[in-house]
Image (spheres, rainbow, N blue to C red):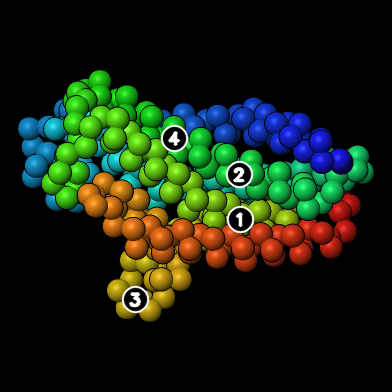
Amino acid sequence: MSAVDAPAFFVSELRLVSRRRRNQAGLAVLAAVPIIIAVAMKVAAPSSSSSSQGPEFFGSITSNGYFVALAALAVEIQLLLPIAVATIAGDSVAGEANQGTLRYLLTVPVDRTRLLAVKFAAIVVGAFVATMTVATAGLLAGWALFGAGPVTLLSGSQASVGGSLLRLLAMCAYLTVCLAALGAIGLFVSTLTEQPMGATIAITIIAVTSWVLGAVPQLDWLHPYLLTNSWTAFGELMRSPIAWEPLRDGLLSAAAYMLIFLSAAWARFTTADVSS
């Protein structure tokens, strides 16, 4: 495949990802969660202050619907968003092999490195769309039930509606990078099997295991190296001034994971004997 064909190949890959019914169903589930949170908080508003569990964003929902989006992101980043990315990543190469289209792609011919690059780019776009779906659904549901207005930041100062929306976009971008690291792992796993469902399950288990290990105090020495260790640092963007160090650590960690596992995926895929 020539370089000029790469954009068309990328667009084709995005269409393939967006047309899969399981991906569409996944987006519907992602969008439903913030709506459920908003409705539940509206119904339980009189007694909501008695709850001390969950992300701290929950306590601010009734004062400003903006926080529904943040609460939904904090909840879904622990499982549903990783599953969404795992589904796309697991399908990336294993799905093609399972359907018998991978060999056809490589005889077009398509350069294997470019193929992996397009697959990973589609995973990143999928992660961003999934994250923005949660944020947008939460924002609309929150504003509809609790109203909009200037947002009180975690540091006590206020941000305008426009400024708070920019912060929310930055949070989605940060989480996209974090999820892209999981996507890189998923791309590697997807090169090892022809069973996309098996790859998806394995990727999800990796994310869940990281969360579990991160919750064990006795493993403090391990926490900085865990994939999910800095995922919740997106909340630092709700402070003024912004605490950049946790965000920097999260981005560096994600970059390291991407470098390692994209290299592993490239080494595996470019030397594999593709028979299906």
Q: Residue at x 35, y 50 (%)?
A: 234
Residue neighbourhood size for the residue with mark 1, other residues' Cα within 10 Å, grouped as few (<14), some (14–19), many (≥20):
many
Q: Position of residue 86 (x, y in %)?
A: 56, 48
Q: CA distance from mark 1 to mark 3?
A: 25 Å
First in sequence: mark 1 vs mark 3? 1
Residue 145 at x, y percent in the picture: 21, 23
- Three-letter amino acid code at disc 2? Ile
* Residue 7 circle label: none
Q: Earlier in the sequence, mark 4 or mark 1?
A: 4
- The Cα–Cα distance between marks 4 and 1, rounded to whole angstroms, is 20 Å
Q: Nearer the viewer, residue 253 or 74?
A: 253
The residue that disc 4 covers is 132
Please name the residue shown 45% across and 39% down the image. Answer: 131
Mark 4 residue type: Met
- Would residue 193 appear left or right of 137 to someone viewing this image? right
- Mark 3: few/some/many CA within 10 Å (<14, 14-19, 20+): few
Secondary structure under tag 2 reads helix
Q: Are marks 2 and 1 in contact (CB under 8 Å)?
A: yes
**Which of labels 3 and 4 is toward the front?**
4
Q: Where, by quadrant of the figure, is residue 164 drawn? A: top left
For disc 2, the marked residue is: 123
Element class at badge 4 = helix
The residue carrying mark 1 is 184
Q: Earlier in the sequence, mark 3 or mark 4?
A: 4
Gap in Å between the C-alphas at discs 4 and 2?
A: 14 Å
Residue 180 spot, x, y in % from top left: 54, 51
Q: Earlier in the sequence, mark 2 or mark 1?
A: 2
**Amino acid type at image mark 3:** Asp
Label 3 sits on residue: 220
